[in-house]
Image (cartoon, rainbow, N blue to C red):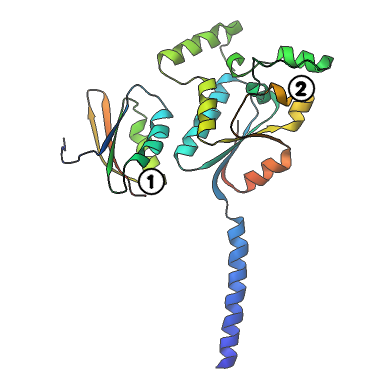
Amino acid sequence: MTHDLATVEKQVAEMRAQLESLQKRVPSNKLSMVVFSGDLDRALAAFIIATGAVAMGMEVVMFFTFWATPILRDPAKKVEDKDLMGKMFGTMLPKGACSVKLSKMNMGGLGTAMMKNLMKQKNVASLEQMIALAGELGVQIYVCELSMELMGFKREEMIQYPSMDFCGVAKFLEEAMDSRVQLFI
Amino acid sequence: MSEAVRADKVMDLKGLPCPMPVVKVSKGIKDVAVGQILEAQTTDPGSLTDFPAWARTSGNEIVDTIQENGIIRIFIRRKV
């Protein structure tokens, strides 16, 4: 019987090892989101989902890349030492959440202004308010370093946000692999 | 109408649209003890599907839902 016991012990040890390696691969109750779009409507959707996910008990990580990067600029901050391309991007892209436009029916800014008015009337939080709420709720924001570099944005011109950091694709993928839900907006 | 359910705390969320009712209740539920009841008053029709989804996910229980004069009263028992 001692022989049998040894076999069982060995099997238990093997199963334990397998279980441990499986546990490592079980994603956390986390939402990883790529925010790629610089449109007001899409950014709003991203923050509504992000704050809702916190309410649902999830950890939330947002990655801002490409056209979404300027959403996080602070319009009150000025950066002097930019090269020509940086200056161009800086001028042509929105300066913060207050100046992003609708993806449809913008109509030279009229549509966006009307939508903002309507939102106020209907008590819908503005994009700036949603960003502040996300910060309060502990939503982690990462900003794509490559986008910062390409568009010539400086860290000093980004908004004050409780947990904002800068990263590359590996950080996003690490978080995405550990997330039960992943979205690209 | 069941007046049997008595709330230990009432949250006035009237006029607030998505995602605010659920965001605020997920915080407010912590103000009542486990076993106690939180009443959320909203005017957002989406709450009728959102609160049950939130309760299932967070492990709390909707014990009653009353609709009157455009106001939705949702009674949530804190279970966790």
Q: In which quarter of the image is the C terminus of chain A?
A: top right
Q: Position of residue A109 (x, y in %)?
A: 59, 7
> Which residue is disc 2 drawn over?
A151
Identity of the amino acid at label 2? Met
Q: Where is residue A112 in the image (x, y as percent from the top left)?
A: 55, 11
Front of the two marks 2 and 1: 2
- Check the image and name the residue furthest to the bottom: A1
Name the residue rendered at 19%, 41% in the picture.
B5
Q: Where is residue B53 in the image (x, y as percent from the top left)?
A: 39, 41
Q: Label 1 near label 2: C-beta < 8 Å?
A: no
> Which quadrant of the view contains residue A98?
top right
**Spatial CA span between label 2 and label 1:** 44 Å
Q: Position of residue B21 (x, y in %)?
A: 38, 30
Is A145 drawn above or below residue A2 in the view shown? above
The circle drawn on residue B56 is 1
In the image, is A17 to the left or to the right of B29?
A: right
The chain carrying label 2 is A
The chain carrying label 1 is B
> Do discs 2 and 1 belong to a common subunit?
no
Element on which disc 2 rests: helix
Name the residue rendered at 59%, 78% in the picture.
A11
